[in-house]
Amino acid sequence: MSNKAKIRERAKKLNPIDDLMFRKMAEEPGFCEEILRVILADPGLEVRESIPEYAGTNLQGRSVVLDARCVLGDGQQVDIEVQKRDDDDHQRRVRYNGSILTANIADPGIQFKAVPDVCGVFISRFDLFEGGHVRYHVDRVAREAGKAVGNGFTEVYVNAKVKDGSDVAELMEVFTRDDAYSDKFPVTSRSKRRYKETEEGQMVMCEVVEQIVNELVEEELLEIRRKGRLEGAREGRLEGIREGKLEGIREGRLEGIREGKLEGIREGKLEGIREGKLEGRLEEKKATAIRLVGMGHPPDYAASVLDVDIETIQQWLEANEQR
């Protein structure tokens, strides 16, 4: 099977819970409006604007890319995130994303009472709080007063694990199951069917998957090459100096010492770069495999894309987990 065929098969398996498909679907404000009406239990909610892959910048630290930023009819801003893997502190992720979004949309010099309201919506395959609920609202509480207090930032978590027969649970079925569609969510179902079943939609998703894979490979390749060149050059210089000194001493002449150093440095650099490139190619494949699996791709997919046997992929993953 060619790489393009493998990419097409992978694209067919994507669902709205996958950020690649979700971000394409979020280009349509009506999709975001439909799911937010269900998740936030507000049938009259309106989405004026939806911005998938919104880049929130932070000049002093880590910037973020939100799966979707939505502007509601009342001016409230919503960050929607989808997540399949329970592999990080996702509450801190929601908090950080909310703070970056707030900082990016607040006008300079405004009073704090004018800071825009922001809601973080976190959609996951797993039950983050393990409480057996399909939806959780996280509130700020004044402990001594025994009451909830608001500061303009709210958090709502929904998951696909809990099946309680509610509209939220049914929506999560559409998000996670290949064959799940619902007349209750016509915009979501239509958009999902387009990207999963139509030729035009499949072409779009294949391009997205291929672009992501190529970008990951290119990023890792450039980084590994850079490290390989630096390490090779450093080792080559040290080896060249050592060999040059030994050769010069054996010949017993100062000219031999100087020439030996120069020749040794040159040969050492070349040998170091050659060895660094060989090791770098293997390391770039290892890093790319770990990255692909971390994104939710199966190990056999990483093996086929990188042309490496599955046993080697498994060894790399096990070694990475033991770190």
Image (spheres, rainbow, N blue to C red):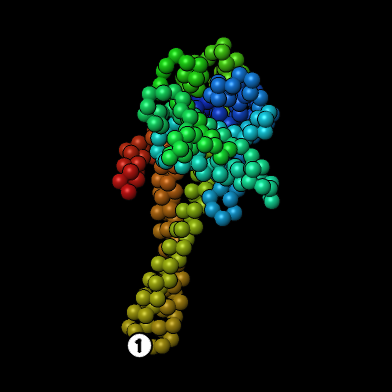
- On screen, residue 145 versus residue 45, left or right, reads left
Please tell me how crowded label 1 is: few (under 14), some (14-19), or many (20+) other residues with Cα within 10 Å.
few
> Which residue occupies the foreground of this view, 313 or 46?
46
Q: Residue at x 56, y 48 (%)?
A: 63
| Identity of the residue furthest to the bottom in this view | 253
- Residue 184 placement: quadrant: top right
| Identity of the residue furthest to the top in this view | 183
- On screen, residue 269 versus residue 70, left or right, reads left
Q: Residue at x 40, y 54 (%)?
A: 279
- On screen, residue 291 versus residue 99, left or right, reads left
- What amino acid is labelled 1 in the image? Gly
In the rendered view, tell whether residue 276 sits above or below residue 235. Answer: above
The count of marks equals 1
> Which residue occupies the foreground of this view, 233 or 56?
56
In the rendered view, tell whether residue 122 sits above or below residue 283. Answer: above
Give the residue at mark 1.
252
Residue 211 image point, x, y percent: 57, 37
Q: Residue at x 47, y 16 (%)?
A: 166
SS of the residue under disc 1: loop
Residue 293 image point, x, y percent: 42, 37
> Which residue occupies the foreground of this view, 183 or 320?
183
Residue 182 image point, x, y percent: 54, 13
Q: Can see residue 40?
A: yes
Q: Residue at x 64, y 20 (%)?
A: 44
Q: Can see residue 66?
A: no
Residue 288 image point, x, y percent: 45, 43
